[in-house]
Image: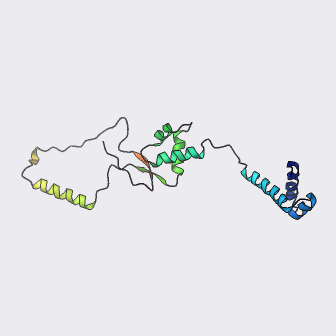
């Protein structure tokens, strides 16, 4: 079929004519008519509406892959990825991922009951020990400030498939 002939079955199908009626009118086989209609529908289906996305799928996958390692925040990932993507968009992409979770960095594993019991028994022994003169011990509260990076409130993107990361305090 020529390109002009391919438009005729489409127009007739839109009017509501059956494939049999289109075949008789064009004197073409059923296969030719069905192929022409199917090609039109496939072309119509591939039409996209709206503007094309700025980031390609490959770029989004690269951002998710870098985020799943858990050692970088959104600004670090943005710096590594070429292109004009903003930090907020990197955060949105990581948040939309089904297997990444944004969680607070833990400095170490949580203390078990055994750890707590051992600490309490050590404290009881130290209090009753004659080696330490408790009148000469001074207790005070320290507060540490970080100017360059907030170490106490660090967050990271974690992958559900990878074990939880522990970050050192210093």
Q: Can you give x and y, in whole percent of width and height, for residue 119 in the image?
A: 20, 56
Q: Nearer the viewer, residue 156 or 43?
A: 43
Question: Is residue 116 placed above or below 166 in the rendered structure?
Answer: below
Q: Can you give x and y, in whole percent of width and height, for residue 77 in the image?
A: 48, 41
Q: Nearer the viewer, residue 146 or 46?
A: 46
**Visible residue check, residue 18:** no
Quadrant of the image containing the C terminus? top left
**Residue 94 falls left or right of residue 105:** right
**Residue 38 falls left or right of residue 146:** right
- The structure's colour scheme is rainbow
Question: Is residue 50 placed above or below 82 in the rendered structure?
Answer: below
> Residue 42 appears in which quarter of the rendering?
bottom right
**Residue 22 falls left or right of residue 76:** right
> Residue 52 appears in which quarter of the rendering?
top right
Q: Can you give x and y, in whole percent of width and height, for residue 89 in the image?
A: 54, 43
Kindly give the residue lying farthest to the left in the view shown.
130
Image point (84%, 58%), residue name: 32
**Visible residue check, residue 113:** yes
Image point (10%, 55%), residue name: 128
Kindly give the residue lying farthest to the top in the view shown.
147
Q: Nearer the viewer, residue 62 or 109?
A: 62
Q: Can you give x and y, in whole percent of width and height, for residue 155 in the image?
A: 41, 46
Q: Nearer the viewer, residue 93 or 7?
A: 7
Question: Is residue 158 placed above or below 81 in the rendered structure?
Answer: below
């Amino acid at each position: 079929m020529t390109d002009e002939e391919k438009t005729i079955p489409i127009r007739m199908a839109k009017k509501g004519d059956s494939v049999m009626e289109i075949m008789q009118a064009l004197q073409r086989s059923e296969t030719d008519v069905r192929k022409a209609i199917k090609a039109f529908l496939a072309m119509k289906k591939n039409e996209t509406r709206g503007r094309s996305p700025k980031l390609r799928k490959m770029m989004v996958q690269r951002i998710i892959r870098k985020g799943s390692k858990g050692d970088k925040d959104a600004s670090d990932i943005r710096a590594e990825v070429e292109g004009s993507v903003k930090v907020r968009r990197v955060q949105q992409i990581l948040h939309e991922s089904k297997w990444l979770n944004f969680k607070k960095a833990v400095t170490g594993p949580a203390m078990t009951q055994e750890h707590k019991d051992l600490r309490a028994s050590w404290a009881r022994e130290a209090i009753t020990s004659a080696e330490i003169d408790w009148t000469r011990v001074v207790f005070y509260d320290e507060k540490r400030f970080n100017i360059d990076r907030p170490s106490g409130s660090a967050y990271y993107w974690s992958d559900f498939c990878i074990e939880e990361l522990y970050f050192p305090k210093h």
